[in-house]
Image (tube, rainbow, N blue to C red):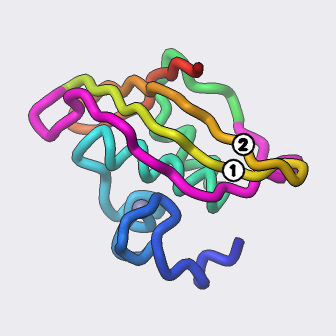
Amino acid sequence: MNIVELNNCPCGTEMSYAQCCEPFHNGTDFPRTAQTLMRSRYSAYVVKNADYLLATWHKTTRPNEIDFSQDHTMWQKLVILHTKKGGVNDDKGRVEFNAFYVQDGEERLIHEISRFKKINGRWFYVDGVLD
Ligand SMILES: [Zn+2]
């Protein structure tokens, strides 16, 4: 996907990518809440920004690398279903979401409850429960 053509941010806000997740992806700003981090990580999957995904992954669960070269997932949209804690004054949070995508011509969705932790003011993705 051509990043320049993203008028609306892939994470589903009404803002442009430049006003929403791009500053997180290029390191000029950082998410203040677990939900904002969750959104920015979804956007990072859309624009295939492996560095950002690794940088926001908790060190205890972080993979060694993320390889998008064989990835043909076409992300459609993110729907946040529920958020528990994860606010500016919290240091833990959970975000439940549906992420819709097309793979091999089939529409699918991921339903996950992700857990996040804040360390030194920065939110990190810890892990998620799929069902
Ligand atoms: Zn966004």
Q: Quadrant of the N terminus?
A: bottom right
**What's the amino acid at mark 2?**
Arg
The residue lying at 44 percent from left, 62 percent from top is 12
Residue at coordinates 30% horizontally, 50% vertically from top-left?
Answer: 31
The question of residue 79 being in magenta is answered with yes
Contact between marks 1 and 2 (CB within 8 A): the answer is: yes
Q: Residue at x 39, y 23 (%)?
A: 115
Q: Position of residue 4 (x, y in %)?
A: 59, 83
User: In the image, is the residue at mark 2 within 8 Å of ligand 1 by its beta carbon?
Assistant: no
- Could you tell whether 103 is left or right of 13 in the image? right
Q: Residues within 10 Å of mark 1 (few under 14, many from 20)?
A: some
Residue 108: assigned label: 2
Instruction: Answer with the quarter of the image where residue 124 lies.
Output: top left
Q: Quadrant of ligand 1?
A: bottom left
Along the horizontal axis of the image, is 120 left or right of 41? Answer: left
Residue 51 at x, y percent in the picture: 59, 48
For marks 1 and 2, the one nearer the N-term is 1
Where disc 1 sits, the SS reads strand
Q: Position of residue 32 (x, y in %)?
A: 23, 47
| Residue range highlighted in magenta | 66-90
Question: Which amino acid type is shown beneath numbered disc 1?
Answer: Tyr
Q: Residue 9: horizontal and vertical position, in percent?
A: 47, 69
Whether residue 27 is situated above or below residue 57 in the rendered picture: below
Q: Give the position of the C terminus as an image quadrant.
A: top right
For label 1, the residue is 101
